[in-house]
Image: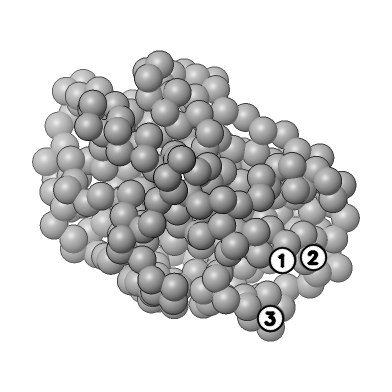
Amino acid sequence: MAVNNPSDRTEHDSWDIVSSVGFTALGVAAARALQNRRAQPLAVDPFAEAFVTAAGHPETQALLENAPEEAQWDEQTALWTDFFGARTRYFDEYFAGAGTPQVVILAAGLDSRAYRLPWQTGSVLFEVDQPEVLRFKADVIGKLGAQPLVDRREVAFDLRDEWAAALTAAGFDPEKPTAWLAEGLLIYLPGPAQDALFAQMHALSAPGSRMGVENGFRPGDVERVREAAAKGVVLRSGGSDFDPTTLWYDDPRADPQQWLAERGWTVAPVGRAQVAASYGRPFPEQFAALWSSTGYFTAER
């Protein structure tokens, strides 16, 4: 089965918030901003709309400015915002039960959990991402006058490089339990980079550590998404012409759940559609089947 060769990626590519992988974070922020407008939102991100406004990208701005009232949303708009709303809530709940003195959010993007979730007293939260993305987020939140609810530390580094030393230099202690998050990340990593990422997380994880992970693709998954798009069974990015499949990887890689289990981690997987249904927002059957391989899992050491 053919694997995807991302046409818009290079080995050491970088980005800001309105280009390449950075733009996907902006799109997710737009989805969270719309979720805020639901009568019963799955998750509330008070910073999401400010990110979209500050970025000034015409597509994401138009999405929010032209959005009708919730009662007039079409099925695709509701599905799009619930897809990310359910994911956000699932990992919010993961952190609520983590109870570790350290938190590391990998490819943090426009994640605002440091500013909107309650954290254990004395805990430290590290955000790892491209420098331009972290700079944009800090600027927007700084202008709003918001303060983090935890000791938040930035690690401006590419996860395809030797990021562990930079994390340690920021004060990370590998002798303390850590709650890791890899949300919306693995589909943007080639197989060898993903394998190296899990090996590094494992090496840095003291007993009592946890992981919250959104699975990446398997070989052939991107082709299936493209075929589904041709039939109209796909997640529409708010009507955008942006094609995220040009950024995704589905080349061979180790199964992280099996890899971790073999090293003593207790792994608990859950389907993406199962999570959404548990929150009262079930996915259409064809859509649920399309994304069945990219669910979530938590792991404990």
Q: How many residues crowd mark 1 within 10 Å: few (<14), some (14–19), many (20+)?
A: some
CA distance for labels 3 and 1: 11 Å
Mark 1 residue type: Gln
**Tags 3 and 2 touching, CB below 8 Å:** no
Name the disc covering residue 200, or none: 1
Residue displayed at 53% across by 46% down: 216
Q: Is residue 93 visible?
A: yes
Estimate the x, y position of residue 120 in percent, counting from the top left: 72, 54
Of label 3 and label 2, which has the lower sequence position? 3
Marking on residue 165 = 3
The three-letter code of the residue at mark 2 reads: Ala
Q: Please indicate whether residue 7 sits to the left or right of residue 201 in the image.
A: left
Residue at the spot x=50%, y=69% of the render? 129
Give percent across and percent down for residue 9. Answer: 36, 66
| Distance between mark 1 and mark 2 Cα atoms | 5 Å
Q: Which residue is mark 2?
A: 203
The quadrant where residue 164 appears: bottom right
Lateral position of residue 176 relative to residue 213, left or right: right
Query: Seen in the image, is 268 located left or right of residue 280?
Result: right
Amino acid under label 3?
A: Ala
Which residue appears at 52% of the width and 42% of the height? Answer: 218
In x, y percent, where is residue 97? 71, 41
